[in-house]
């Protein structure tokens, strides 16, 4: 995100529901997730968007999920609204334009 010219900040409060704030003309709350090797039988990766335990993120807490898929060395950027789980597919691959408003 820095290489794209955005200002990126880290919240001071460790209990914040997001990991970074991205200033791209407006402030976007970004939660960073990582997938290491939980590939499904169909060859895709599934991500469950939970804060901890069985508590899901609320729509007002996060704007974007940035998911790093380690085996592919790739970033997937998904809009957070209404998302609870999602199969990570190429529609979200390196979708940095999610920060363009």
Image (tube, rainbow, N blue to C red):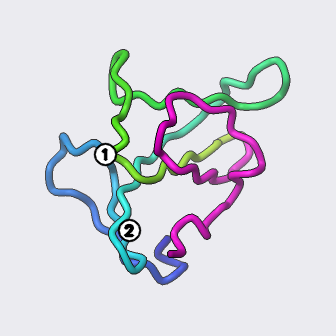
Residue 10 point in image, percent of width and height:
27, 61
Residue in view at x 45 percent, y 47 percent = 32
Helix, strand or loop at mark 1: loop
Residues drawn in magenta: 72-101
Query: Which residue carries the number 2 mark?
Result: 22
Decide which of tag 2 and tag 1 comes sooner along the chain: 2
Q: Is residue 93 above or below residue 80?
A: below
Identify the residue at the far left of this view. Answer: 13
The quarter of the displayed image where residue 24 is located: bottom left
Q: How many marks?
A: 2
Left or right of 53, for residue 95? right
Residue 20 located within the stretch drawn in magenta: no
Residue in view at x 51 percent, y 36 percent = 83
Q: Is residue 81 above or below residue 56?
A: below
Residue in view at x 74 percent, y 45 percent = 72
Residue in view at x 48 percent, y 41 percent = 33
Residue 79 located within the stretch drawn in magenta: yes
Q: Is residue 44 above or below residue 100?
A: above
Query: Which residue carries the number 1 mark?
Result: 60
Helix, strand or loop at mark 2: strand
Residue 61 point in image, percent of width and height:
30, 45
Left or right of 54, for residue 43? right
Question: Which label belongs to residue 84?
Answer: none
């Amino acid at each position: 995100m820095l290489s794209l010219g955005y200002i990126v900040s880290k919240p001071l409060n460790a209990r914040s529901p997001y990991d970074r704030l991205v200033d791209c003309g407006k402030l976007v709350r970004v939660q960073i997730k990582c997938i290491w090797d939980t590939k499904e039988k169909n060859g895709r990766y599934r991500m469950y968007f939970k804060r901890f335990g069985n508590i899901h993120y609320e729509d007002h807490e996060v704007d974007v999920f940035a998911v790093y898929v380690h085996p592919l060395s790739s970033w997937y950027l998904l809009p957070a609204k209404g998302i609870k789980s999602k199969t990570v597919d190429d529609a979200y691959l390196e979708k940095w334009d999610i920060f363009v408003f």
